[in-house]
Image (cartoon, rainbow, N blue to C red):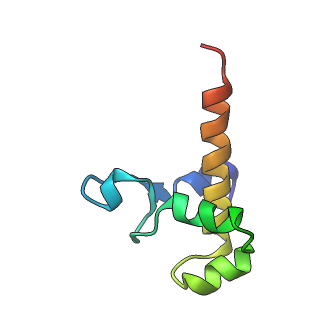
């Protein structure tokens, strides 16, 4: 999968996790995965804790955060 394909694994649905971006078909928020990674967990540990996710989901979360950061850092 390319980086652009990875973010297609993420959706925002009204009424699900207060509208936070989640992985399609789950109620797992992207920010939950990012928080786990930031706390020191490895991708493998995240996937172990959330068997419905794969390593590509973890990469999608990182790409999502990177894309958001690029948008925020862009001059207005």
Residue depicted at 63% across the width and 47% down the height: 65
Q: Is residue 39 above or below residue 69?
A: below
Q: Is residue 11 left or right of residue 71?
A: left
Q: Is residue 66 left or right of residue 25?
A: right
Q: Residue 47 is drawn in which quadrant?
A: bottom right
Farthest residue, direction top: 76
- Percent from the top left, x then y, of residue 50? 54, 81
The quarter of the rendered structure image containing the C terminus is top right
Residue depicted at 69% across the width and 54% down the height: 2
Say if residue 71 shows up in the picture. yes
- Percent from the top left, x then y, of residue 21? 44, 54
Closest to the observer, 57 or 8 = 57
Q: Is residue 10 above or below residue 51?
A: above
- Percent from the top left, x then y, of residue 55? 68, 73
Q: Residue 28 is drawn in which quadrant?
A: bottom left
Q: Is residue 66 above or below residue 55?
A: above
The quarter of the rendered structure image containing the N terminus is bottom right
């Amino acid at each position: 999968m390319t980086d652009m394909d990875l973010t297609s694994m993420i959706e925002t649905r009204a009424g699900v996790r207060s509208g936070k971006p989640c992985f399609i078909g789950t109620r797992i928020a992207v920010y939950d995965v990012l928080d786990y990674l930031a706390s020191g967990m490895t991708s493998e540990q995240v996937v172990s804790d959330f068997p419905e996710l794969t390593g590509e989901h973890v990469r999608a979360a990182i790409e999502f955060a990177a894309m958001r950061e690029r948008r925020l850092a862009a001059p207005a």
